[in-house]
Image: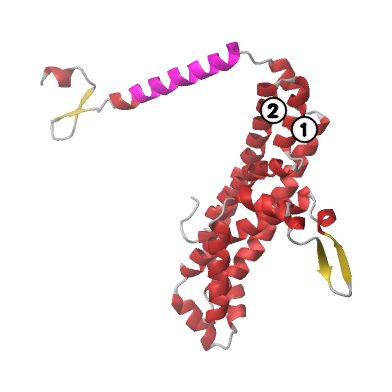
Amino acid sequence: MSQSAASTAALPDVSGHTIVAERYWGRWMAVAVILVVLAALVRAFAVGQIEWDVVAQFLTARAIMEGLANTIMMTVGAMSLGIVLGVVTAIMRMSPNPVLKSVAMGYAWLFRGTPVILQLLLWFNLALVFPTIGIPGVWSARTVDVMTPAVAALLGLGINQGAYTSEVVRAGMLSVDVGQYEAAKSIGMTRLTALRRIVFPQAMRVIIPPLGNETIGMVKLTSLASIIQFSEILHNSQNIYYANSRVIELLMVAAFWYLAVVSILTPLQMLLERHYGRGAGVGR
């Protein structure tokens, strides 16, 4: 046996040949490098100029808790609006009607082609274009009174999300075999009934993973609404550090709560994936 083989664990097999166990030195080196980097990061934050008692003090401050609640509510509201618009747009996109298909494609092109922050600013400043909104002869109001930061954020984030969700839903619908559509049609189902009872239940296993990822992304995307003065976590954290100059400490507080919310949503996404992936070997 060679010297290199002798330096490793060796076991005889049934045929009398020597089996040399592989050492995986590259893996151990990678683990060592990662541990060194992590230790360096932990030490940097531990000895850096961060007042951790200030972080603990503001972690549950009233303004931060209000910002957290607003972030969660905006995430739920924007995603709900986005899902409704996304489903409707995906159905329109796959419709044989060329007008509906063109409208759906134009909607996705417009809102996926412009930055979210630009859309938020446009909604917030809508009064510069339309001073009043309403139904002629029934109801009208000043746009500046209606388009509050919360409403502008909901519309900006939700409508933008709808454009992306429409592609996710369309991909799920395309994953269902065309024979399923034909079978539903052969037993007299309408197109919408077939979508509701046959197509969407099968498409969910394809839709849920990216949609769950979009939801987690929305939690962080709400921070962009701080530019239009919506009181979410980052905006309220900024208001506090403008007053006490504890910038990094308040940013750490905001980071903690974003991570906390995402840490709760991630296992929920996995449970949904497992539920809709039953019978297809998905989520195991």
Q: Residues in magenta?
A: 28-48
Q: Which quadrant is home to the N terminus?
A: top left
Image check: 271 left or right of 126?
left
* Residue 279 versus residue 91 in the image, above or below: above
First along the sequence among labels 1 and 2: 1
Looking at the rendered structure, the kind of residue marked 1 is Ile
* Residue 159 versus residue 49 in the image, above or below: below
168 or 162: which is nearer to us? Answer: 162
**Residue at 80% over, 51% down:** 148
91 or 158: which is nearer to us? Answer: 158
Looking at the picture, how far across and down is residue 208, in whole percent?
A: 56, 56
Residue placed under numbered mark 2 in the picture: 253
Q: Could you tell me what secondary structure mostly forms the magenta stretch?
A: helix
Residue 200 seen in the current view: no
Q: CA distance from mark 1 to mark 2?
A: 8 Å
Name the image quarter holding residue 155. bottom right
Q: Secondary structure at mark 2?
A: helix
**Residue at 77% over, 33% down:** 64
Looking at the rendered structure, the kind of residue marked 2 is Val
Check contact, mark 1 vs mark 2: CB within 8 A. Answer: yes
**Residue at 51% over, 19% down:** 41
181 or 3: which is nearer to us? Answer: 181
Q: Residues within 10 Å of mark 1 (few under 14, many from 20)?
A: many
Image check: 147 left or right of 162?
right
Residue placed under numbered mark 1 in the picture: 64
Per the image, is 231 magenta? no
Disc on res. 144: none
